[in-house]
Amino acid sequence: MALLGYFTHLGILVCIYAILAVSLNLALGFTGLLNLGHIAFFGIGAYVAALLGLAGLSPWIDIPLAVVIAALVGVILAIPTARLKGDYLALATLGFTFIISSVARNWTSLTRGALGLPGIPRLGSISVVLAFVAGFALLCFLVVVWISRSSLGRKLQAIRDDELAAQVLGTNTFLYKLIAMGISAAMAGLAGAWYAHYISFIDPSIFSIPDLILLIAMVVVGGLASVRGAFIGTVIILLLPEPLRFIGFPPTLIGPAREMLFALVLLLILLFRPRGILGKVDIS
Amino acid sequence: MSSIAAQLILNGVIAGAIYTLVASGFSLIYNVTKFMHFAHGAILAIGAYLFYAFFGLGWAVALPVSIILTSILGALTNFLVYRPLRKRKASSAVLLISSLAAMIFLNATLLAFWGADVKTLPHANPIFDVGIASITATQIAIVAVALLLLLGLTLLMKKTRLGKAMRALADNKDVAQTVGINPERIYTVAFLIGSALAAVAGILIGLEQNLNPVMGIQLVINGFAGAVIGGMTSVPGAILGSLLLGLVENIGIWWLPSGYKGAIAFALLFLFLLFRPQGILGKKQREA
């Protein structure tokens, strides 16, 4: 039974991270936005759901609210940063992650700061949670597949490939970047809300930079602009360090070893297979 | 002026000098190679930890050994990670992502070797009273070294053949190559010098504050923010930007809890990226 519980736990994490990976792929892979603020949307979703849940709201209200607020924050971040490109966009969005994490750490009357928020209500047994997150992961994948095949997806990919040309042909690139960031942030918020309700404890370490690299590794390993790739990348990156637990690795070294492992995998993929496993485009 | 205000301004100048130290190496590498080498933060931390490791052997050994080893490590990162990527004609976004991965890798190595607990470098650090504020010996050293390094870097960039080659490369790689400049060799030199500067910054910061494995991440981003605010392409601009950042942060905690220091830095960076991306003294770039 313990083993079944362990696999269910892994399954839930895979689904939550798959939602994150596919939503980051929408911004990074399909639209070409080097957004290092994605982990902040995840954290915002988690905090909103946790705070509202602890205040006594039903999860069926707090999770949608977390999604809406994450989406709003995504659009608000996109408005000023839409005209930034490449390095500067990366820096501004990374700065945004630091600001949000600093607020979570210091607004102690609301977030309890570094103490974190314990006792976030769970939604039934872990198999029930797995069923729900698997359903939502599937829904997010279908939405991204649908977007990629619709005229919206073609416009986003046109912005990625040649923004100036897209503008010349009459696309309001500003508006479409807002839409892409909004949808991407909404999904990250959804993942965060489920994460908070599953783990039942969150603290400001949810905004950590290593976790951001973990997400980018999932997208890059799977391949940019590939929906199936995002899923495969998530499974590989998430499950790769798991054997470390069973070969008698010293527990204090598991954390650093995990980080080294996924940093190394990301570097090797960038060096030897820059398009990832199923990627369709290069990182521009 | 009250003595608290004077102390806050002095603290701001010291913080500005620390960011200048960090920014000097980072922006040297950025200006020559044109990508954001975030792993610079991890290299800075490793420099500080190497100094800590050799600290028992005395300053005369620990200082040169840690600076030289850190310098070599920086060049090695360039050789093993960035050079093969450049050979594949990887975009600067790929280089940026690889530098984040390298940063995580180096930080995790540091964590595995020395653990997550904070380390201190015990040393005599007399406090001087200057009228209405006070300053420690280490803080004086930080401000002095920051000024010396910037003077040295300005001379290097403007007066030497190496500096001219670096500027030529930064300006136009193809033309630089046709006049016989070997880009890879100059990149190696930039990483050697930049990483040695990172070690100096790491050691001084370690002496002034403490050592922890992730000390470099926030520092490198603040240092870079200072450089962006002042103007990436201008050395006086980098001092000015770092100073402004240090002052705004330290004076900002007059109104906000000190935990918000980092957020103030990014808010300032954000404003500059939006309204004056070339910085205070920088020239307009052809393509950002």
Image: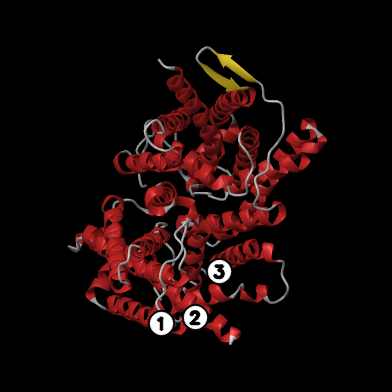
Q: Which residue is mark 2?
A: A11
Marks 3 and 1 on same chain? yes
Q: Which residue is mark 1?
A: A134
Depth check, front residue: B280 or A163: B280
Q: Amino acid at mark 2?
A: Gly
Label 1, secondary structure: give it: helix
Give the chain of mark 1. Answer: A
Residue under the image location 39 percent in, 39 percent down: B264
Residue B79, image x and y in percent? Answer: 64, 54
Whichever of callouts 1 and 2 sits on the residue coming sooner in the sequence is: 2
Q: Please tell me whether residue A283 is drawn above or below residue B19 in the rendered image.
A: below
Depth check, front residue: B269 or A125: A125
Q: Is residue A44 left or right of residue B104?
A: left
Whichever of callouts 3 and 2 sits on the residue coming sooner in the sequence is: 2
Label 2, secondary structure: give it: helix
Residue under the image location 39 percent in, 71 percent down: A194
Q: Residue furthest right?
A: B57
Give the chain of mark 2. Answer: A
Residue A269 — which label?
A: 3
Q: Residue furthest left?
A: A170
Depth check, front residue: A64 or B146: A64
Q: Residue furthest top?
A: B131
Q: Amino acid at mark 3?
A: Ile
Residue B117, image x and y in percent? Answer: 65, 49
